[in-house]
Image (cartoon, rainbow, N blue to C red):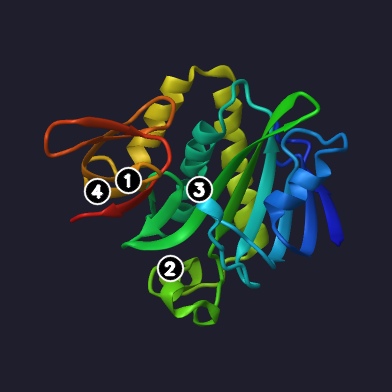
Amino acid sequence: MKTGEFHNPSRKIVGRTIWHYDAVESTNDTLKELLEGDLPEGLVVWADRQAAGKGRHGRAWASPPGGLYLSILLRPKEVHAQVLGLLAGIPLVKTLRHFGVFAVLKWPNDAIFQGRKLAGILSEGVYRRDMYHVILGVGINTNLDLDRLPPDVQARATSLKREVNLYVANEECLEYFLEQLDDVYSRYVHTPTPLMMKEYRGACSTIGKRVSVETPKGRVLGKATDVTPAGALVVVDGQDGRHEIVDGTVEYAE
C-alpha cells in the first residue's frame, strides 16, 4: 500500500517523484507491475521493508525494517541494463563514503567494506509496449539490525550503523543517493558510455585482484584486468587466455 508521494522539481530526471510504501514483495516487481500505466522516467519506489527482496540470479535479499530499499525507473539511450547497473555503483559508494564508510565496488554490483557487503544493485531490463526500460533496484544496509539476519548472511554483511556507530536516517541517505544518481544518469544521457565506464573502473576494487568467477559456462580462475565499456569483467587465466565475463559471481582468490 502506497503511504506517501514526494516531489522534487529541482532534480533533472532521477527522483523528481518518489512513491513510498510501508511494505512490498519487491520494489523491482512493484515497478514492473506499474509499468502498464504512464509513469515518468526517474520515478522512485521506496519501501521500508520487502517481503521477498531479491538479488542477482534470483537470490533472496534479506530486507527487514532498518534498511533502505528502492527501485528507479529509467529509459536509457541504449539497451543498457548491465551498464547502468555498474554506473549506479558510482553514486552508491559516494553515498556510503559521505556517511563515513570508505566502501569500494566489487564487480558487478556490490558495495563492500573490509570484505563485508554494505549495499547491492539489481538492474533489470524490461520491455513494455515496445519500449525498453531499466529498473534499477538498490538495497543499502543503513540501520539494519544484523542479528536479525540469517547466520550465513551475518558473516558476510555489515551496515552503516555498525561501522560508524551512528543512526543514519533513511530519508537523508535516500536524498543524497538520488542526488548523486541524478547527476550520473544525466551525464550518461549526454556522454559516450566508454567515458562513463572509466569512472566506474576507478571505484572497482576487483580490477587487479586474482579472482575465481562462477559463470553459467563454468568457473574461471585468473587475474581481473579490466571492465569493458559494455560492462564485462576481463579475466586473464594462467595460460594467458582472455575471458570477457558478462554474468558471474566473483570470489577473491587472495
Callout 3 amino acid: Leu
Residue under label 3? 92
Q: Position of residue 98 (x, y in %)?
A: 48, 53
Residue under label 2? 157
Question: Are discs 3 and 4 less than 8 Å apart at CB?
Answer: no
- Local SS, label 4: strand
22 relative position to 109: left or right: right
What distance separates the C-alpha of mark 2 from that of mark 4? Answer: 20 Å
197 relative position to 57: left or right: left
What distance separates the C-alpha of mark 3 from that of mark 2? Answer: 16 Å
Q: Looking at this view, is 81 or 104 the one in front?
A: 81
Residue under label 4? 211
Callout 2 amino acid: Ala
Compared to 182, does 212 lie above or below?
below
> Residue 218 bears which disc, if any?
1
| Residue under the image location 79 percent in, 60 percent down | 21
